[in-house]
Amino acid sequence: MSEPSTDLIDALAGIRAGSALDAIRAKRSLARDNAQHSYELLLHPAEPGDVSLDERRAVAVFVALLHGDAAVAEHYTRLLAVPELERRLAAEAEAASAQGPYGAYPPGPLSAEDEAGPIYRAGDDARAALGPRLAAALEHAHLLVFHPRDAAGEALARLVEAGWSADGIVTLSQLVSFLAFQIRAAIGLRALAQAGEAA
């Protein structure tokens, strides 16, 4: 029996070492290695700096739940391992559920694709439970996931007001972007695996 891959995207997609999809992924070994390295730097940094491990992992749980991916959410929930916070994140993700992408382009030909949508704001109870920093981080993560066209100066100012440094904001934005890539890659690879099984 083949062993699970040590690459997280492979594991989340259910790819086993020696499988046809493993061989396909091996042809892009640099991209595979870089994705794994990004995961390790963002979620397991030796020096967390301005964004704590719990903040990173809480944001990861929230983003995975927003994407509706149970396997990725389960992975990050295990990584966070703070049951009370996990329950709050699940409640907030349910309240913040949306489809997207929403937002407005600068005036011009693409304006025809403008679409209004819900903007998540943590309520008073959530803000008290999460603290201002994490509440602001979740609001920003929701913006990047569902309103990428609307991520402007005002959104960054809200993070600064909540105590986020410039370095912390960069790390947070990198984390959300990476998670979106990781989740979509896992979903796409799962679909390829299922198509191969059906063929």
Image (cartoon, grey):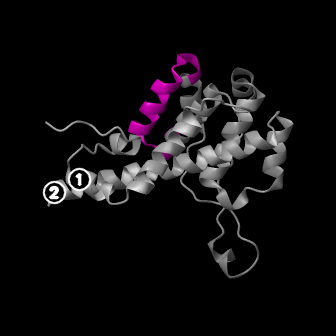
Q: Which residue sits furthest bottom?
A: 109
Taking the spot 55% from the left edge, 41% from the top edge, the residue there is: 63
Checking the image for residue 194, the label placed there is: 1
Q: Where does the image place residue 20, in percent across and percent down from the top left? A: 21, 55
Residue 17 in the figure: left or right of residue 68: left
Residue 86 against residue 137 in the figure, above or below: above
Checking the image for residue 198, the label placed there is: 2
Q: Where does the image place residue 99, in percent across and percent down from the top left? A: 53, 53
Q: Range of the magenta residues?
A: 65-85
Q: For numbered disc 1, what is the local secondary structure?
A: helix
Residue 145 shows in the view: yes
Q: For numbered disc 2, what is the local secondary structure?
A: helix
Magenta stretch encompasses residue 38: no
Image quadrant assignment for residue 129 = top right
Residue 66 shows in the view: no
Q: Nearer the viewer, residue 72 or 67?
A: 72
> Mark 1: which amino acid?
Gln
Residue 82 against residue 114 in the figure, above or below: above
Image quadrant assignment for residue 6 = top left
Residue 159 in the figure: left or right of residue 119: right
Quadrant the C terminus occupies: bottom left
Image quadrant assignment for residue 84 = top right
Tags 2 and 1 touching, CB below 8 Å = yes
